[in-house]
Image (tube, helix red, strand yellow):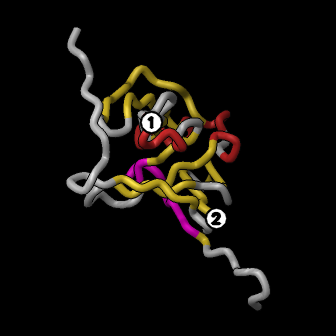
Amino acid sequence: MSEKSIRIPGPDHPITVEYNPCRVVVTLGGRTIADSRDALTLREASYPPVHYIPRKDVDMSLLRRTDHSSHCPYKGDAAYYSVIPGGERGDNAVWTYEAPNAAVSNIKDHLAFYPDRVDSIEEMASPEAGTF
């Protein structure tokens, strides 16, 4: 069994995780899978941003854990879920880092969705206090 590499984000491969002030809603097959005002947005190197949604804001009854897994040297080992109402398109559409590396520890207990395996991942701007 080979050891999995662990890398620390830095100037050559930056990673930031920030609170997302927008409401983030994920839909598939006409159903809302996730709806959160507490999402985190992870930006990694030149990859598109990824929204990580707290489990409390995901309808876990619509997900089924799969045997699929992957490893990222920067984030750790990922576990996967399929979105049941999504049929084949929803297979392994969701991933989570249950024990993420220290540099991204705040994504623990959050789920992320592949944009091409759901109908939409929508950011809805929250009106700022006092603005009408």
Whether residue 120 appears in magenta in the rendering, the answer is yes
Task: Tell me the quarter of the image containing the C terminus.
Answer: bottom right
| Cβ atoms under marks 2 and 1 closer than 8 Å | no
Mark number displayed over residue 23: 2
Task: Tell me the quarter of the image containing the N terminus.
Answer: top left
Residue 91 in view in this figure:
no
Of the residues under marks 2 and 1, which one precedes in the sequence?
A: 2
* Disc 1 element: helix
Residue 110 in view in this figure:
yes
Of badges 2 and 1, nearer the viewer stands 1
Q: Amino acid at mark 1?
A: Ala
Estimate the x, y position of residue 17 in percent, counting from the top left. 47, 54
Left or right of 74? Residue 95 is right
Q: Few, some or many C-alpha atoms within 10 Å of disc 1 (few <14, some 14-19, many ≥20)? A: few
The structure residue drawn at horizontal position 26% and vertical position 22%, both measured from the top left corner, is 4
Left or right of 118? Residue 2 is left
Q: Amino acid at mark 2?
A: Arg
* Highlighted magenta segment, given as a residue range: 114-123
Q: Few, some or many C-alpha atoms within 10 Å of disc 2 (few <14, some 14-19, many ≥20)? A: some
Estimate the x, y position of residue 54 in percent, counting from the top left. 62, 45
| Residue wearing tag 1 | 102
Estimate the x, y position of residue 124 in percent, counting from the top left. 61, 71
**Foreground of the two, 93 or 74:** 74
Looking at the image, residue 130 lies above or below residue 98: below
**Foreground of the two, 23 or 62:** 23
Tell me the quarter of the picture where residue 92 sits: top left
